[in-house]
């Protein structure tokens, strides 16, 4: 089962703006880019050409792992505004 | 609610927050319970159970009306090697003496919040608290997306990431060794098939903990819980360990699901929900300062989880109750200072929460040091021993025994041949 199939099992209400932000200049200097593999929803992807972090915030499971694991403490992490984000039916 | 002012505000309608709010309402206090989800439970995940005795202290005889899934009657431990496994089972009769239940958190948390409302709690879902309001170093209220609310005391129950505890300096940045990342799937399976596979009577349930296999040599634990017609399967792993592995969390879950012993339970099931959550597993040494002027922290926000014994929801509820009792006293005395609220800490120290966490303050260190023994060596030796005991293949027994003993000497150091459980217990009993 791939990650897209997994995320397709979930109900989300997508906000217009991202609740996750990074400073791309800091990401550029980051060797490990832990966020690109530790996120259980595969939210982060480094775009080598544009030198920016692509953040698919609409898939976020709101766990908080990225913020803690980031070596550069470069992820500004907050909860999505109310009525937005993931909505678990089983939990 | 006059001028947006109550006596107490509780932030977060999980097990801790609801228990605090309901205890306050029962004492006649005006309490506002806010929750960021559309409903309580929308944002909550666990790989676990609720415990009957401690839950009943908040919701007496809850099993008669609450949405529960199954009453746990069997606890299993799976020791996995790459392809084989040894399973240890403890089975008991549940009738009339429930110990633990599996629940669907969306339904369960919603039910709990409804009970709180019935008992007089002002309940405000769809309310995200952006920050606490401070005046002269006292917490005096909350600022939500749209308005402000004021109270004599704020109880913070906003979960493991607790942005509010951090705002007022009660919590520092979380260390990645103090939390575990957990991923989980809920897999739908025909009810009769599920009961056959787990050998369960109707309404009875099984809790499985999984060591080794793809999780070998990692501070990680797999789990499987039976619900009515679904199985919750997942694992948790220390965040610092999965960082080092450079593996995607769901790929490790795939490996666990593919292990022959595990896959037999879930085969032909349909994954109906994938989820992830952090568990505060730092134990006693990671518990932050729990109170200040006009504020207390409870539940996961206070890192009150005993991962050695799989306890979290029960400690959340108890901490909520103890904070509420402290608040009732403080309101009656009109004293909301930190010296008044320090009684919450005293109550925690006198309760099983901090007593047990203190008992286990060094256990995680022992387990981490001996993780190879626990997650790799024990499963292998158990399987090899049972293989020798049960296989008839024409090879002389003495030859097999000699080979087995040689393996133990080769694989294990002297310390790891001392059963780890005894080592850990001995460490706990040292003052």
Image (cartoon, helix red, strand yellow):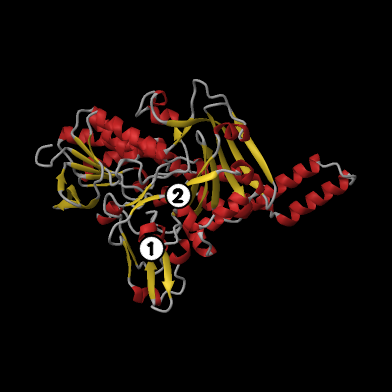
**Quarter occupied by residue A1:** bottom right
Is residue B320 visible in the rendered structure shown here?
Answer: yes
Q: Tell me what residue is drawn at x 52 percent, y 48 percent.
A: B234
Query: What x and y, as percent, mark residue B35?
Result: 27, 44
Which residue appears at 36% of the width and 51% of the height? A12
Q: Nearer the viewer, mark 2 or mark 1?
A: 2
- Dot 1 falls on a residue whose secondary structure is loop
Say left or right for B361 vs B405. Answer: left
- Tell me residue B332's x, y (percent): 17, 32
User: B119 or A43: which is nearer to us?
Assistant: A43
Nearest the viewer among B295 and B215 is B215
Residue occupying image coordinates x 49% and y 48% = B184
User: Which residue is at 65% across, 45% downward?
Assistant: B261
- Numbered label tally: 2
Q: Which mark is drawn over residue A9?
A: 2
Q: Chain of mark 1?
A: A
- In the rendered structure, the answer to whether residue A66 lies left or right of residue B121 reads right
Q: Give the answer, above or below, for where B114 lies relative to B374.
A: above
For the residue carrying disc 2, how many other residues have a C-alpha within 10 Å: few (<14), some (14-19), or many (20+)?
some
């Amino acid at each position: 089962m791939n990650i897209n199939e997994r995320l397709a099992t979930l109900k989300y209400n997508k906000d217009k703006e991202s609740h996750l932000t990074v400073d791309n200049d800091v990401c550029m200097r980051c060797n490990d880019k832990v966020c690109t593999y530790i996120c259980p929803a595969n939210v982060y992807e480094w775009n080598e050409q544009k030198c920016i972090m692509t953040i698919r915030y609409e898939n976020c499971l709101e766990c908080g792992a990225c913020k803690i694991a980031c070596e550069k403490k470069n992820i500004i992490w907050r909860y999505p505004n109310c009525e937005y984000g993931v909505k678990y039916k089983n939990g | 609610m006059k001028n947006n002012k109550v006596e107490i505000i509780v932030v977060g309608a999980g097990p801790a927050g609801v228990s605090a709010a309901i205890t306050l309402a029962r004492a006649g206090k005006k309490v506002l319970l806010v929750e960021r989800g559309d409903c309580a439970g929308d944002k909550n995940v666990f790989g676990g159970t609720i415990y009957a005795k401690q839950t009943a202290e908040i919701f007496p005889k809850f099993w008669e009306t609450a949405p529960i899934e199954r009453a746990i009657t069997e606890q299993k431990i799976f020791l996995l090697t790459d392809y084989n496994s040894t399973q240890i089972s403890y089975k008991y009769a549940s009738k009339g003496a429930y110990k633990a239940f599996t629940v669907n958190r969306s339904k369960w948390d919603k039910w709990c919040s409804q009970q709180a409302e019935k008992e007089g709690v002002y309940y405000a879902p769809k309310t995200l608290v952006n920050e606490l309001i401070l005046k002269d170093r006292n917490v005096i209220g909350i600022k939500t997306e749209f308005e402000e609310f004021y109270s004599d005391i704020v109880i913070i129950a906003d979960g493991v990431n607790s942005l509010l505890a951090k705002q007022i300096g009660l919590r520092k940045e979380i260390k990645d060794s103090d939390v575990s990342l957990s991923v989980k799937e809920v897999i739908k399976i025909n009810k009769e098939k599920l009961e056959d596979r787990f050998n369960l009577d109707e309404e009875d349930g099984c809790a499985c903990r999984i060591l080794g296999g793809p999780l070998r040599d990692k501070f990680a634990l797999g789990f499987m819980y039976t619900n009515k017609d679904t199985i919750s399967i997942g694992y948790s792993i220390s965040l610092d360990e999965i960082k080092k592995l450079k593996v995607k969390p769901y790929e490790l879950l795939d490996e666990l699901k593919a292990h022959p012993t595990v896959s037999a339970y879930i085969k032909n099931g349909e994954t109906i929900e994938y989820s992830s959550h952090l568990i505060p597993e730092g134990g006693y040494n990671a518990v932050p300062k729990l109170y200040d002027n006009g504020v207390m922290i409870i539940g996961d926000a206070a890192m009150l989880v005993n991962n050695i014994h799989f306890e979290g929801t029960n400690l959340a509820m108890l901490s909520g109750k103890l904070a509420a009792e402290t608040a009732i006293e403080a309101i009656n005395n009109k004293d909301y200072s930190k010296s008044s609220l320090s009684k919450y800490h005293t109550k925690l120290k006198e309760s099983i929460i901090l007593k047990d966490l203190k008992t286990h303050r060094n256990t995680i260190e022992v387990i981490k040091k001996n993780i190879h023994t626990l997650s790799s060596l024990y499963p292998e030796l158990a399987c090899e021993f049972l293989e020798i005991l049960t296989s008839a293949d024409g090879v002389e027994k003495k030859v097999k025994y000699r080979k087995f003993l040689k393996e133990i000497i080769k694989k294990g150091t002297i310390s790891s041949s001392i059963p780890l459980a005894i080592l850990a217990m001995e460490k706990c009993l040292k003052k």
